[in-house]
Image: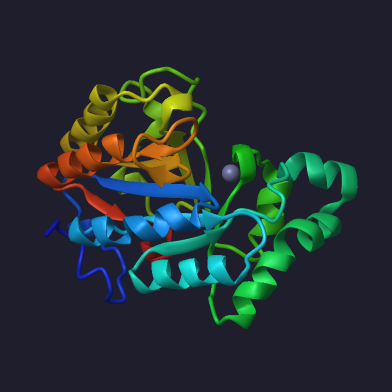
Amino acid sequence: MAQGAKDSTSPFVLNLKEITHGLLFLTFDDHDVVGWRKAIPFFAQNNVRATFSLSGVIDDGALECMKALREAGHTVGLHTLHHADAPEYIEKHGAAAYMKDEVKPQLDVCKKAGLAISTFAFPNNRYDDVSLELLSAKFRHFRVGCGLPRGSAVADFDKAFTPIDKFEGEKLFRGFGVGEYYGSRLDDLEAVLDRLARNNEVATLFSHGIAPCAKGVNMPLELLVPLVSHARSLGIVMAGLDDVPW
Ligand SMILES: [Zn+2]
């Protein structure tokens, strides 16, 4: 069992001081309620706590999925009702309209179902000071991008990495995309993990649906399985955004 991680079903708070070989946040956005549920046993077997941020209408099926993920120890976040870019929407329609049209409908469903939500993934990684301040009234942890140019190697891109001793209190989780669309290659991802473990750094990865041979912006199991296996062999802790103690 990786250091710093416990039984995935127990309440769990990361102790950064116990992490010596890197910390990785696996995050997934949008609405793959079928693929995500199917991945729960794989994550459980590999002691992975991940983060899933829902976009779209949270109907009964989505709610069941969110509850199952939460029960399995994962972080469940929100990703807005219509996937609108926050800065542009706020600029055009105002902050109140953004909350009413994009955020509140999802939050209301979760509240009614007794699901407390602390994590928000900005659609298309679009955010600015105004939207961040606005959403900070409702959420504590935010998945954004790290600015990696599409197709470039992640392992050499310093903005994708944070030393563990500089990470405490950070509310922005700056991710890099993984999937065909992002030009991801297993050798680069393994180099990312090697760097994390070697330097005891923190990194965040984002993708979307999870399936065998998944294309586009989605996570193929052919990448996810060896990636998780390599991370485990290096002693990297894989946690959800809500597992941080702030
Ligand atoms: Zn999205």
160 and 63: which is toward the camera: 63
Vertical comparison of 45 with 8: above or below: above
Residue 37 visible at all: yes
Measured as percent of width and height from the top left, residue 105 is found at 73, 67
- Residue 63 location (% of width, % of height): 54, 70
| Residue situated furthest right in the rendering | 93
Quadrant location of the N terminus?
A: bottom left
Taking 169 as reference, is 164 above or below it? Answer: above
- Judge left or right: residue 45 versus residue 116: left
Residue at x 45%, y 41% (from the top left corner): 207
Ligand 1 is found in the corner quadrant, namely: top right
110, 16: nearer the viewer: 110
Q: Position of residue 157 (x, y in %)?
A: 38, 23
Left or right: 115 as drawn, with respect to 85: left
Residue at (31, 69) in percent of width and height: 13
Give the image location of residue 216, x and y in percent: 49, 30
Q: Quadrant of residue 219?
A: top left
Judged left or right of residue 54, residue 5 is left
Q: Residue at x 47, y 40 (%)?
A: 174
